[in-house]
Amino acid sequence: MTDLKLPLIAEAPQSAAACVHCGAALAPGQGRFCCTGCEAAYGLVRGLGLDAFYRRREAADGALRPEAAPPVFDALPLIREDADDVKALDLMISGLTCGACVWLVEQALAAEPDVIKARVAFSTRRLDLRWRGAPSRGNDLIALLSRLGFRLAPYTPACMRATEDAEGRALIRALGIAAFGAMNVMLVSIAVWVGEDMGAHTREFMHWLAALIGLPTVLVAGMPFYRSAAAALRAGRVNMDMAVSLGVLATAGMSLVETFRNGPYTWFDGATALLALLLAGRVLDRAARRKARQAVAEVLALQDGMVALLAGDGTTRLVPVASVEAGQALQIAAGEALRLDGRAQVETLLDTAAITGESLPRGFAAGVALPAGAVNMGAPFTLEVTAPARDGSLAAMARLLEAAEQSKGRFVSIADHAARYYVPIAHAIAAATFLLWWVGFGALWQEALVNAVCVLLITCPCGLAIAVPAVQVVANGALFKRGVLVASATALERLGEADCAVLDKTGTLTEGRPVLIPEGQDAAVLRDAAGMARASRHPLAKALLRACPEAPLMEGTREVPGQGLQAGTARLGSPAFCDVAGFSDGMVLVYRAGADAAPVMFRFADRLRADAPQAVADLKALGLPVELLSGDGPGAVAAAAKAAGIAVWQAEADPRAKAAHIESLKQAGRKPLMVGDGINDAAALAAAHVAASPAGATDLAQTTADIVLQREGLAMLPDAIRLARRAQILARQNIGFSLAYNVIAVPAAIAGLVNPLIAALVMASSSLIVIGNALRAGRA
Amino acid sequence: MEALILLVPVSLLLGALGLVGFLWALRSRQYDDLEGAAARILFDDQPGKDPPP
């Protein structure tokens, strides 16, 4: 049946040629563009005189392909009117890959005569657009950017929350102040340290100068630590920030006393430098996680939108999802996702892949409950809403998630573990030292206090406090470069601990979309069939078109929802639609060129990701037994499991069953890593010890996952685990080193052998060693 | 040593100027999009359109 001599039609094109505009690989026979949209965009860019964009950009991976029918939203309700007839609009823009994209967007908009301001914030994906004139120009400008291949969405409050980083700004401010203070105090302190011939008066002047700069710095720049310490104290816990706060404040207080006494040295320099160092670590750590949050917010904004509310008089208007109540009617366009639960008066064809994991759309009879999250594959219909967003099935799923996430919130990070024991012991030793010298040896209380403060200084866990964050900053950065986003602070630790892996099938192990099985169909026939398929959004039609992307649209094609396509006498659709008996509907399309022509079969399969078997093997080699857990039928699951080399699998698992399975693994003392992409996986993802979602996962899965793989495929997952484990080892080494150093230094401090200068020097050197060790985390 | 009377306030003043500049930049949100600023500096604007009045 299969003729191997014919070219494998469904294979991805191997030619090195890439589309001039979007950079996607071209199929053989295509000229310079992969689609007419790209050709038009290229013409537009050249027409604006902006073709330098193509030379300047760093990467083109096909992301910039303009969609044939971009999801439209009406910007009119979002437009703000400022004084002087100036209209302002905030948009979220997706598809930016590098600075050249920012340039292209800004310049293309600036070329419009009425645009006053167009500025893109690259890291927040926010486009600030201002123009003079009619509000409707806003929609024109959005259309212009869509034609270039960028996708736009309203800048929602959710975006705002993710990007508004008041706490991050406070940290940067504290860092700036601490760095300023540290450098200026250092100027004065160095004079004191080296100026042995300095007169007593000059020295006093220097001390007061250092206090003048150092004291406000310590008080202001240390606020993030004091706040965190106070919050922990109120909650009845101890954390590392408490030790830091006490150490810094004790040093500053001690220095102030020395300033009053005009003693030989003060240590404002040490206190401020320590704050600057710790704050720098915090800022970097936060920046890395902000990127991850940002990516998730971008996905959310693109999918969260407006719905078309059908008024009594038959007109529609766009309203936010949250404002729709039960009983109202929505107009659902072809290809639009249902955002609310409802019923339809007609038969509908819905793609429920995101909710149940079923790989093909299926028909729903009139009047049955239609789940939110499904995508309309058939004709437009009217949806009668049965539950508002807050009570709907998606909200129920979200509540399921919250419950599961709370258990994750109880995870105690390794740094907190260390702090829990370390802080009380360190402070107890300092107090004991004071009492020992004052009461025990009958020393002056000042002398006893100096020794106690030395203990505090030495035990001030600057090595310990940066031991773990330094490793995490380096490791998260290394992962980010490889396209792996780490979304939560403890995700890396949990990933390193994972001891078994549970994978979802559709969209995780497989590509989540059907691919034509090449069976030697005639190329001309394939071309004709693909030309008809161009008119449909059905996954199989799309797959057929992908196998022959250059096929032109066959004129006069119309869709019979749920059955197939018709163009004159030619038909493309389910076997029943084309009068072919003996085939059950499934991953099959039949094409008939005319009523009498012989039917041609096109069979499809949801192909395994190319790197899935290797990734599974790598996971096993890392000591993680792999299981497959899917909502699909047993046949498909067994086949996928066999192909990927997975021995343990379970089919027909609904969302609750998936979460229950993860729970049972946890009950058995395992630490499961769950990898999934669908709404149906979200509960399991939330329940798992650590969760990852592959590229192209649904928004709910991405927000639930701790780790988001941004590139196609699973290959990065084993790498990420390796890197996480390495980071764990380094973090432990760092903690161990810091503790060992304390074990040696503290007895010396108690004995009064260490003066604060030596303590500060040794402390700084331990920090440097810890940071140097952490840098190794980037190399996996 | 008399020079210190002049030099110390001058150095502090210069440092404080830098700090004020930093705080101003932070407040006017110039630290919000570091990546974009880093990329934007490499490209020239298109000549042509007159600046808005």
Image (cartoon, rainbow, N blue to C red):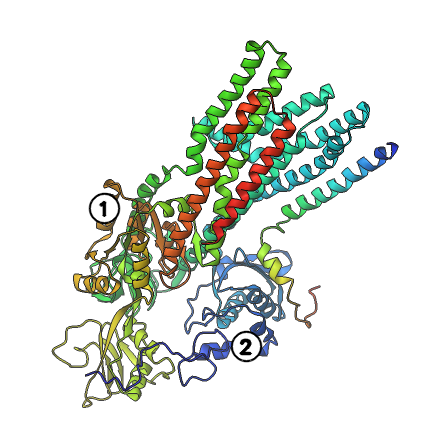
Given residues A210 and A462, the one toward you in this image is A462
Residue hosting label 2: A44
- Is A721 situated left or right of A91 in this image? left
Between A466 and A315, the one lying in front of the other is A466
Instruction: Confirm whether residue A326 shows in the render.
Output: no
Where is residue A610, by image quadrant? bottom left
In which quadrant is the C terminus of chain A drawn? bottom left
Q: Position of residue A218 (x, y in %)?
A: 63, 32
Measured as percent of width and height from the top left, residue B42 is found at 64, 65
Chain of residue at mark 1 = A
Residue type at tag 2: Leu
What residue lies at 38% left-to-right and 52% top-to-bottom? A721
Q: Position of residue A618 (x, y in %)?
A: 33, 58
Dot 2 alpha-carbon crowd within 10 angstroms: few under 14, some 14 to 19, many 20 or more: some
Tell me whether the residue at label 2 lies in contact with that at label 1, contact meaning CB atoms closer than 8 angstroms: no
Residue A184 place in picture, x, y as percent: 72, 37
Circle 1: residue type: Ala
From what the image shows, is residue A264 above or below residue A397?
above
